[in-house]
Image (spheres, rainbow, N blue to C red):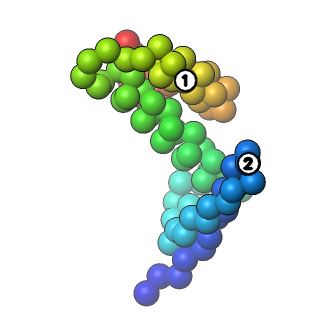
Amino acid sequence: MVDTEIYTIEGPNGDVESIELPEGLVDVFAEQGEEPTSVVGDLVVQAFAQQAHVVVHHSEGETAADLSELNEEMENIFEERFGVPLSEAMGHSH
């Protein structure tokens, strides 16, 4: 059996969620010397950027303006964190 470790996310209103992950999994995605919490943060940013992209660009029907604005800001956050546009990281753009 694999041990687990817990990471905690705190929201702007003080709500807290604990995420349990298999111990060592975060290390698989880390670069040498990178802190585990940064790796988890990177994955959260990547996941939200990808999911926002899917909702805005790959859903059927009209996309609400507020969703487009949220996606655009998420793309900005992604680029600030990783130094490349989301479209380049994903290999396609719209």
Residue drawn at the location 60% of the way across and 53% of the way down: 40
> Disc 1 marks which residue?
70
Report if residue 36 is visible in the image. Answer: no
Quarter of the image that includes the C terminus: top left
Horizontal and vertical percent position of residue 31: 62, 51
- Residue at the outermost bottom position: 1
Q: Residue at x 62, y 51 (%)?
A: 39
Percent coordinates x, y for residue 21 in the rendering:
52, 68
The residue under label 2 is which amino acid type?
Asn
Residue 34 picture location, percent across and down: 69, 53
Would residue 82 appear left or right of 94 to someone viewing this image?
A: right
On screen, residue 2 above or below 52: below
Q: Is residue 82 left or right of residue 3?
A: right
Category of crowding for the residue at label 1, using alpha-carbon neighbours closer than 10 angstroms: few (below 14), some (14–19), many (at least 20): some
Q: Mark 2 points at which residue?
A: 13
Disc with the residue nearer the chain's start (1 vs 2) = 2
- Which mark, by number, is residue 1? none
Quadrant in the rendering for residue 52: top left
Residue at left offset 73%, top offset 45%: 12
Q: In which quarter of the image is residue 93?
A: top left
Q: Please give left or right for residue 89 compared with residue 30 in the image.
A: left
Q: Give the foreground label among 1 and 2.
A: 2
Q: Label 2, secondary structure: give it.
A: loop
Cβ atoms at labels 1 and 2 below 8 Å apart: no
Alpha carbons under labels 1 and 2: distance apart: 20 Å
